[in-house]
Image: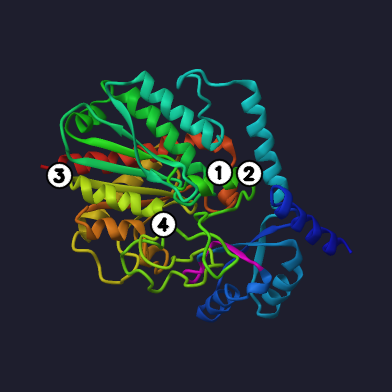
Amino acid sequence: MMKRLLVLVALFAAVFGKETFEGHQVLRIVPKDEVQLTLIRDMEDMEMLQLDFWREATDIATPVDVRVPFHSLQAAKAYLESQDLQYSIMIQDLQVVLDEEEEQMQSAARATKARNTDSFDYANYHTLSEIYSFQDMLVAENPNLVSKIVIGQSYERRPLNVLKFSTGGNNRPAIWLDTGIHSREWVTQASGTWFAKKIVTDYGRDPALTAILDKMDIFLEIVTNPDGFHYTHTRNRMWRKTRKPNPGSSCVGVDPNRNWDAGFGGSGASGQPCSETYRGPRAHSESEVKSIVDFVKSHGNIKGFVSIHSYSQMLLYPYGYTRTPVKDQRELHSVAKTAVAELASLYGTRYRYGSIINVIYQASGGTIDWTYNQGIKYSFCFELRDTGRYGFALPANQIIPTAQETWLALMAIMDHTNKNTK
């Protein structure tokens, strides 16, 4: 009876309001051998369980995190136990965690409304409209350093805003940063907002950043997937993809980090519209991706490209779609090693680093594989905090520490890019 009631509650919420995750658990499974790894991967195809893999099966001894809906808990646990797959419960009831998150957001919003970027609350999560408002305030306050360009529109016709930090000159070499391409990774958009303020605060004060901006421009897209991000606030906190309907399917959206023309359609992306890693009908089918592609190509002088995700605490470089090492592998590995050491120097946060395919898994159609193939040597991808205790529901009190330590790694990458750009 209780199970039926919760299913009805979930259906009601899906039709009339926010989807509920009441009773959903996040389980951690650690495969002991290749057989167990295969058994866990088989679970990804058990569509009736409606599992949501937060961290996919990659290799032996690397934890797999999976959100299990309440109605599937009994069946999922029975399968794990029958196959001798050991698991632990990382999150007992996801909705409890999300209720706390929302309560804190609402409390912070009631307490203060930012009149300028100095009074903006960087220590809390914000809605899309609040981030758009922040961008406009930052531009208004720093007209000689910051401008806002709109590189396109999302499927639902929201502007794809990019902040340009520049001290003048035409078509100077540039560095691109983006956050929030996967909409549920809220610590990334929050960190991107903090980065924007950090850039205007440190220019003229920090010699390394000043040297970068005296020679190069920085482009920052804080909300790379605005439709998905809006949806995480209004309907489904765990939404990852874009919001474009898929013809012939009731499932909506494409994984924008499988939609790039780099090994498109290969292993590590799904051809099924209901999958969280659905690649889309063709490369660059999503306007959120195509707008960046067109911008990068028309600019023609981007030297560094950093796409920021969460979670897992990793710094990655190409390739994801092939085991063939990039020709600059040694240099990129060295830069990543330096950046990770800088990051750890603040709070001791440990990151793994290396190529995507070696550190995590084969993934085709990814952002930085495409940018590297366009000649942007310094192409990197971050996976920010944490390693799974909270996963995508990282508490707001970790936003600023996450942004601060990540900034040190970003500075290492941007400094190297600047010093190695003619």
Q: Mark 1, residues whose alpha carbon is within 10 Å: few (<14), some, or many (≥20)?
A: many
Q: What residue do we see at 33% from left, 41% from top?
A: 410
The numbered dot on residue 420 is 3
Front label number (4 vs 3): 4
Separation of residues labelled 1 and 4 (CA atoms): 17 Å
Q: What residue do we see at 31% from left, 21% from top?
A: 143
Of residues 385 and 204, the one nearer the viewer is: 204
Q: Which residues are magenta?
A: 50-61
Main SS of residues in magenta: loop
The numbered dot on residue 230 is 1
Front label number (2 vs 3): 2
The numbered dot on residue 264 is none
**Residue 315 visible (yes or no):** no
Relative image position of residue 300 (x, y in whole percent): 18, 48
Separation of residues labelled 2 and 3 (CA atoms): 44 Å
Q: Mark 4, residues whose alpha carbon is within 10 Å: few (<14), some, or many (≥20)?
A: many
Is residue 401 found left or right of 364 in the rendered image? right
Mark 3: which amino acid?
A: Asn
Secondary element type, mark 1: helix
Disc 3 + disc 1, Cβ < 8 Å: no
Judging by the rendered image, the residue that carries numbered circle 4 is 286
